Image (cartoon, helix red, strand yellow):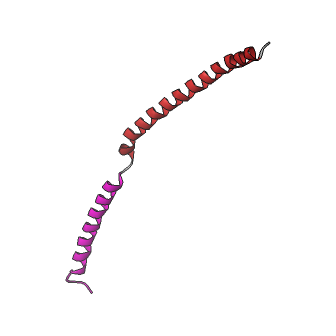
């Protein structure tokens, strides 16, 4: 057997393995993209964004401040 024949035989044996590997990687990447898209849609339904949280906390702090002011100004305070 010549060197050319050996290289062609090794190449013929290696290329299907490489093709299968690449096909698997491409399918996995597509699946990950689909999962990421699904996650980006579902995430806001489950978790609160930082801006929404800050707005809510600001409102609560203002409300507590008003309550504290009313308690401070109460006439029957000791």
Q: Position of residue 77 (x, y in %)?
A: 25, 84
Position of the C terminus, as image quadrant, is: bottom left
Horizontal side of 30 relative to 16 (left or right) equals: left
Residues drawn in magenta: 49-78
Q: Position of residue 41 (x, y in %)?
A: 37, 39
Q: Please state which of residues 17 and 35 is positioned toward the viewer in this rendering.
A: 17
Q: Please state which of residues 13 and 77 is positioned toward the viewer in this rendering.
A: 13
Q: Quadrant of residue 3?
A: top right
Q: Residue at x 56, y 29 (%)?
A: 25
Q: How many marks?
A: 0
Horizontal side of 65 relative to 40 (left or right) equals: left
Q: Please state which of residues 40 and 14 is positioned toward the viewer in this rendering.
A: 14
Horizontal side of 78 relative to 50 (left or right) equals: left
Q: Residue at x 39, y 48 (%)?
A: 47
Q: Quadrant of residue 69?
A: bottom left
Q: Position of residue 31 (x, y in %)?
A: 49, 30
């Amino acid at each position: 057997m010549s060197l050319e024949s050996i290289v062609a035989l090794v190449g013929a044996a290696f290329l299907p393995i490489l093709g299968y590997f690449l096909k698997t990687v491409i399918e996995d990447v597509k699946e990950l993209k689909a999962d990421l898209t699904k996650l980006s849609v579902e995430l806001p339904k489950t978790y609160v964004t930082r801006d929404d949280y800050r707005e809510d906390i600001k409102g609560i702090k203002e409300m507590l401040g008003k309550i504290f002011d009313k308690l401070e100004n109460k006439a029957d305070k000791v």
